[in-house]
Amino acid sequence: MDPIKYFTFSMIISILGIRGILLNRRNIPIMSMPIESMLLAVNSNFLVFSVSLDDMMGQLFALLVLTVAAAESAIGSAIFVNTFRVRGTIAVESINCIQG
Amino acid sequence: MDLPGPIHDILVVFLGLVLVLGGLGVVLLTNPIFSAFSLGLVLVCISLFYILSNSYFVAAAQLLIYVGAINVLIIFAVMFMNGSEYSNDSYFWTIGDGVTSLVCTSILFSLITIIPDTSWYGIFWTTRSSQIIEQDLISNIQQIGIHLSTDFYLPFELISIILLVSLIGAITMARQ
């Protein structure tokens, strides 16, 4: 019964993250927060399985995912700040330069 | 941790409730600074979960990296771009928003029905990891160190290259 409780919470956080990304209509720096919460839910799943299976690989992989999340968040913040400096607006609809 | 059964269960349920409230606060609050701080609450709650599950190093790393670095970066980005515009006129849901909410809710309910019905204990007993080291005499951090330097050596080096590349990229973008 114990892993099921942890799965439930990480599943709720992951689905809230999906919903937060898809229903974000306001501005761009808000969009990085549900992405981090989805990565967090995946981390939590790795750790739940690592504790249940008595295997250390899950904790190691969770550490690697943590590091990748940190790198991605740094690059994302740099891109957002530069976009704001160039465009002057942070509405999600204004990011359409790649459109054909 | 070696807590008695009921205290462990009460702590898990309490932390889970705070976690779900924080997650709802991240997506539903209108002020972006409140969302960023409730993301910090979610990260701290998950750290406490990890401490309850005997994963002390990952809990400490999560507190340092996620709360101390990523959350601070997010709050900086939010405060830097705050006050320009909020596009407050978009409170009405479109048809696409309704379809998305329907899909998310259906995924949630299907997962709620699937997860308790799966026989996780059947899956657990069929997998056996090859343990080359006695795991009782070595602490958690020593096990992580041993695995990082023997099995996970290549991912360790690749992670350092990823961090170097992201550092160079962020500095290059910030210089302009």
Image (spheres, helix red, strand yellow):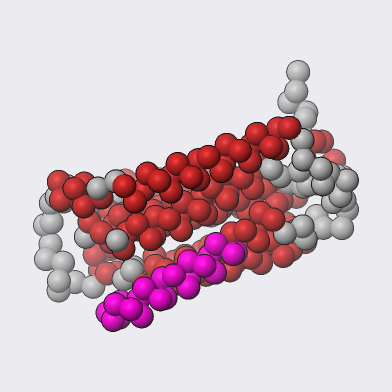
Q: Residue at x 48, y 73 (%)?
A: B14
Q: Nearer the viewer, residue A10 or A92?
A: A10
B25 sits to left or right of B123: right
Q: Nearer the viewer, residue A61 or B22?
A: B22
* Residue A28, horizontal then vertical, whole percent: 73, 46
Q: Main secondary structure of the magenta part?
A: helix
> Count the marks: how many?
0
Which stretch is magenta? B1-22
Residue B57, image quadrant = bottom left
- Is B175 covered by the magenta stretch? no
Image position of B144 with respect to A27: above or below: below
A54 sits to left or right of B10: left
User: Can I make out residue A61 in this image?
Assistant: no
* Residue B154, horizontal then vertical, whole percent: 31, 46
- Is B7 covered by the magenta stretch? yes
* Residue A49, horizontal then vertical, whole percent: 30, 55
B10 sits to left or right of A79: left
B11 sits to left or right of B86: left
Q: In which quadrant is the N terminus of chain A drawn?
A: bottom left
Q: Residue at x 54, y 69 (%)?
A: B18
Q: In which quadrant is the C terminus of chain A drawn?
A: top right
User: Can I make out residue B107 in this image?
Assistant: yes
Q: Residue at x 52, y 67 (%)?
A: B17
